[in-house]
Image: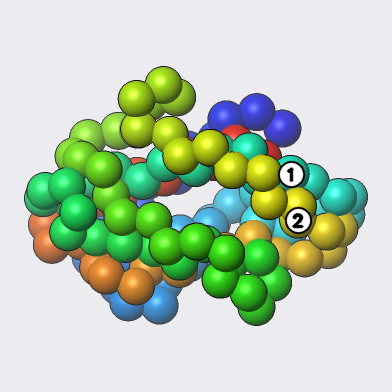
Amino acid sequence: MALSTVSVAAAVAVLGYDLLTSRPDISVAGRNRVLRALALTGSAAAGDSAIDVKIGNVVVATLYNSGTGFPTADASTFKTAYNVPAGTPLSLIVVDAPVTNALNALVDI
């Protein structure tokens, strides 16, 4: 799979919400995968929103939004190399909700 983006309105992205709820093609697969990169932007200001990146029930990272607007593959991407086993869900759980604007996540898996 290549780069995928998800955009969730601030009214929906409340504490505990999984940003990948509407993207089962990203969250679970019947094959082993590698999470290569992540980015989080949006909300009202850089650093005012956060997500926990979970593989199964394990939090592997906490990512704060790096700015407003949409993430780019170059500037706002955090490189990773997390293995995601077949059938194991990948989740992006909101732990610090956005104030006004949508949250935008970029996933390379």
Q: Quick one: 64 or 21, which is closer to the camera?
A: 64
Q: Mark 2 packing: few (<14 Cα in 10 Å), some, or many (20+)? A: many
The answer for how far apart the CA atoms under marks 1 and 2 are is: 6 Å
Identify the image quadrant of residue 37: top right
The residue carrying mark 1 is 34
Can you identify the residue that label 2 sits on? Answer: 84
Query: What residue is drawn where x is 18% and y is 39%?
Result: 68
**Residue at 42% across, 62% down:** 62
Of residues 58 and 107, the one drawn nearer to the viewer in this rendering: 58
Q: Is residue 53 visible?
A: yes
* Residue type for callout 1: Val
| Amino acid marked by disc 2 | Val
Measuring from the top left, give residue 64's x and y in whole percent.
31, 55
Secondary structure of the residue carrying numbered label 1? strand
Horizontal side of 13 relative to 99 (left or right) equals right
Residue 87: give x, y in percent of width and height. 83, 63
